[in-house]
């Protein structure tokens, strides 16, 4: 796909789920991929899968809640690949609790990982993009950043904040041919949803107009498009990948 082949992408949370799918799909499209997450063993498995399909990637241990690890990971990626063209801010966590019972530590941990981490990554990679006057920043937000969710005041706030960050940075760097967009998944089958009861999963499925929950590939395909040259006139956008739960 034009605009992806030969590019260098950095993907956070790439050891599993949506991040893993994004890394594999970008590599399949011809990008070189820096796979970043806390679990290096899982990253190495993803790298082996990419290599088996003829792609090129490198695993880097990066906890996005740790500013020093972010800086080290970006520095290592630049040393390995020479540039960073595409950033996929995917890493995220949940610490669910009703707001009246939510601990300050649960709030801080989710905000630091889901919002501050992406902010720091944007700061760390933007120089490489500005230098080449080309870049794609794609933030993985959530439908709950748009409609809210009971028991997830921290998570919903972090994802709503990520949408605001997306739009603000998009305005700052548009003149340099750098686009900044968000992808907002709905009900997606990932490690985060495996622990849900069968009854809740069925209720989730019935709430989706398309009649099914989404897959990590549904999100990865949207990310791959936004990373491409074909999406060069799209910026500051929130692309909904939710099967029709939220329209308009």
Image (tube, grey):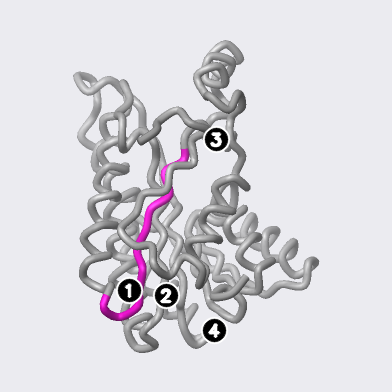
Q: How far apart are marks 1 and 2 (CA)?
A: 7 Å
Numbered mark located on residue 124 in the image:
1
Q: Which of pointers 1 and 3 indicates the residue nearer the eye? A: 3
Q: Which of marks 2 and 3 is nearer the N terminus?
A: 2
Residue topped by disc 4: 81
At x 47%, y 84%, the residue is 83
Instruction: Name the quadrant of the N terminus.
Output: bottom right
Q: Earlier in the sequence, mark 1 or mark 3?
A: 1
Label 1 element class: helix
> Left or right: where does residue 147 sit relative to residue 245?
left
At x 59%, y 74%, the residue is 2
- Mark 1 and 2 residues: CB-CB less than 8 Å, in contact? yes
Please name the predominant secondary structure of the magenta segment in the image: strand
Label 2 element class: helix
Span colored in magenta: 175-185
Q: Earlier in the sequence, mark 3 or mark 4?
A: 4
Q: Earlier in the sequence, mark 1 or mark 4?
A: 4
Numbered mark located on residue 74 in the image:
2
Q: Pick the residue in front: 29 or 155.
A: 29
Q: Earlier in the sequence, mark 1 or mark 2?
A: 2
Badge 1: how crowded within 10 Å, few (<14), some, or many (20+)? some
- Mark 1 and 4 residues: CB-CB less than 8 Å, in contact? no
Q: How far apart are marks 4 and 2 (CA)?
A: 10 Å
> Left or right: where does residue 59 sit relative to residue 178?
right
Mark yes or no: residue 69 visible.
Answer: no
Count all numbered tags in the image, as a single digit.
4
Q: Is residue 176 magenta?
A: yes
């Amino acid at each position: 796909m034009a605009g992806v082949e030969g590019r260098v992408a950095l993907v956070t949370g790439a050891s599993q789920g949506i991040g893993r799918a994004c890394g594999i799909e970008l590599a399949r499209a011809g990008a070189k991929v820096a796979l970043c997450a806390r679990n290096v063993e899982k990253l190495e498995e993803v790298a082996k899968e990419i290599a088996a399909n003829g792609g090129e990637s490198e695993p880097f241990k990066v906890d996005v809640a740790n500013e020093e690890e972010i800086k080290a990971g970006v520095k290592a990626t630049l040393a390995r690949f020479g540039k960073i063209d595409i950033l996929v801010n995917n890493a995220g966590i949940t610490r669910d609790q009703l707001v009246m019972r939510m601990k300050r530590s649960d709030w801080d941990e989710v905000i630091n990982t889901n919002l501050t981490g992406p902010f720091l990554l944007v700061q760390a990679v933007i120089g490489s993009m500005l230098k080449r006057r080309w870049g794609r920043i794609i933030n993985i937000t959530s439908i709950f950043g748009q409609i809210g969710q009971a028991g997830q005041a921290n998570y919903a706030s972090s994802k709503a904040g990520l949408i605001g960050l997306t739009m603000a940075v998009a305005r700052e760097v548009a003149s340099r041919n750098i686009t900044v967009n968000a992808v907002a998944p709905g009900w997606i089958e990932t490690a985060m949803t495996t622990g849900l009861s069968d009854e809740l999963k069925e209720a989730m499925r019935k709430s989706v107009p398309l009649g099914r929950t989404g897959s990590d590939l549904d999100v990865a395909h949207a990310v791959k498009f936004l990373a491409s040259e074909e999406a060069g006139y799209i910026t500051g956008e929130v692309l909904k990948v939710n099967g029709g739960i939220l329209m308009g």
